[in-house]
Image: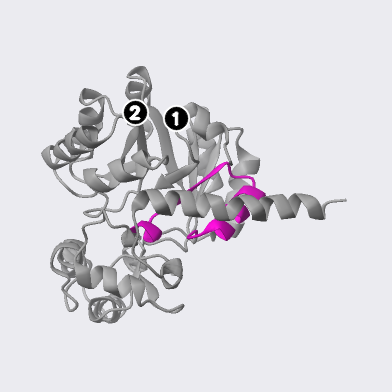
């Protein structure tokens, strides 16, 4: 069985993180992944603090394994949630869409393992200096907020720039992706889109159906003009947003156009107004299955691949 240093640091069986997908990664899904031996992560997204607190309590009622909370630093509730994770004694905090520097000292003093998502070498170096526990190097193949560099390019550069454990994210859906991440120098992986097919994932049935029927060219990136690019499925909303983005719509109107769009997709399956976040690997997600089965399956697939790779070296 594949174990790495991140397993020892966090007390988990498999080096697999479930991505913090806003309005998707709730307490139920996080607990299912943690019970399966990975690290389940509750997504704060743009949700208010009390929603996040409720999801933490749900997760803790369903598992005694470590769980994490992902804090999107662009959220107006980020300060509140930064305090809530301390109050609720969350074991791990991951961060995205910003710089978590102002929170790190207090989190560390509260014995929280801090693992920021980074999309550049400069951010990785800053986080290393601040003494975080590990880094998630997320390439632009992922769903949701994305950076410029691909996973293949980003992960080895982050590994070269730090002595911290690195978790690879973006474009990973099966054992081949896990093995590739380890070959690039990572000691674990984070998957988001793959867990959209989990039985415990409570997205609208039409959202799940879109993922299961996705093709290789099913995603697109919008939002670059505002500086916050997002990858999602090619739906009427995404195409309309792209047209507005490059058609001269004022910034304020463009921001308003996207407000609530993800929630409409997750909760109502609204094909016209909903934003269905998904990574480029959506086409590789072929079946619905328990979250614990996903965790074990990808690791079981990766092990013989890595063993064959070792045999090729003479």
- From the viewer's perspective, tell me whether residue 200 is left or right of residue 257: right
Q: Residues within 10 Å of mark 2 (few under 14, many from 20)?
A: some
* CB contact under 8 Å: marks 2 and 1: yes
Q: Residue at x 50, y 41 (%)?
A: 15
2 or 1: tag closer to the N-terminus? 1
Given residues 120 and 155, the one toward you in this image is 155
**Residue 10 — which label?**
1
Q: Nearer the viewer, residue 156 or 211?
A: 211
* Residue at left offset 41%, top offset 70%: 286
Q: Residues within 10 Å of mark 1 (few under 14, many from 20)?
A: some
Residue 287 position in % (x across, y down): 37, 67
Give x and y (percent) for residue 51.
13, 42
Q: Position of residue 139 (x, y in %)?
A: 50, 57
**Quadrant location, the N terminus:** top right
Where 156 falls versus 282 (above or below)?
above
Quick check: is 187 in the magenta stretch? yes
Q: Is residue 141 above or below residue 185?
A: below
Disc 1 element: helix
Residue drawn at 30 percent across, 74 percent down: 210
| Residue at the spot 44% in from the left edge and 79% down from the top edge | 217
Residues at marks 2 and 1, CA–CA distance in whole angstroms: 8 Å
Q: Position of residue 140 (x, y in %)?
A: 47, 61
Residue 282 can be seen, yes or no = yes
Residue 71 in sight: no
Quadrant hosting residue 101: top left
Relative to 90, does residue 294 appear above or below in the rendering? below
Q: Which residue is mark 2?
A: 91
Q: Which residues are magenta?
A: 172-195
| Quadrant of res 203 | bottom left
């Amino acid at each position: 069985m594949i174990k790495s240093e991140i397993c020892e640091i966090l007390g988990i069986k498999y080096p697999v993180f479930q991505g913090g997908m806003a309005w998707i990664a709730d307490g139920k899904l996080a607990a299912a992944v943690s019970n399966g031996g990975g690290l389940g992560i509750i997504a704060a997204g743009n949700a208010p603090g009390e929603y996040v607190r409720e999801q933490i309590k749900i997760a803790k009622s369903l598992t005694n394994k470590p769980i994490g909370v992902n804090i999107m630093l662009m959220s107006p509730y980020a300060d509140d949630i930064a305090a809530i994770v301390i109050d609720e004694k969350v074991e791990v905090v991951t961060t995205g869409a910003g710089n978590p520097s102002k929170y790190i000292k207090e989190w560390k003093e509260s014995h929280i393992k801090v693992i920021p998502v980074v999309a550049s070498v400069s951010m990785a170096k800053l986080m290393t200096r601040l003494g975080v526990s590990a880094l998630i190097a997320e390439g632009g193949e992922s769903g949701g907020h994305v950076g410029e560099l691909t996973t293949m390019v980003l992960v080895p550069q982050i590994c070269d720039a730090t002595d911290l454990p690195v978790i690879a994210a973006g474009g990973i859906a099966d054992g081949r992706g896990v093995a590739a991440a380890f070959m690039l120098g990572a000691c674990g992986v984070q998957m988001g889109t793959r867990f959209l097919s989990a039985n415990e994932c409570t997205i609208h049935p039409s959202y799940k159906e879109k993922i299961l029927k996705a093709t290789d060219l099913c995603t697109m990136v919008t939002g670059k003009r505002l500086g916050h690019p997002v990858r999602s499925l090619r739906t009427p909303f995404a195409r309309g947003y792209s047209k507005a983005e490059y058609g001269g719509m004022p910034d304020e109107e463009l921001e308003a156009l996207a407000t609530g769009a993800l929630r409409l997709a997750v909760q109502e399956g609204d094909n016209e107004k909903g934003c269905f976040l998904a990574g480029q690997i959506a086409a590789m997600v072929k079946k619905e299955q328990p979250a614990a089965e996903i965790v074990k399956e990808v690791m079981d697939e990766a092990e013989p691949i890595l063993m064959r790779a070792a045999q090729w070296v003479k």
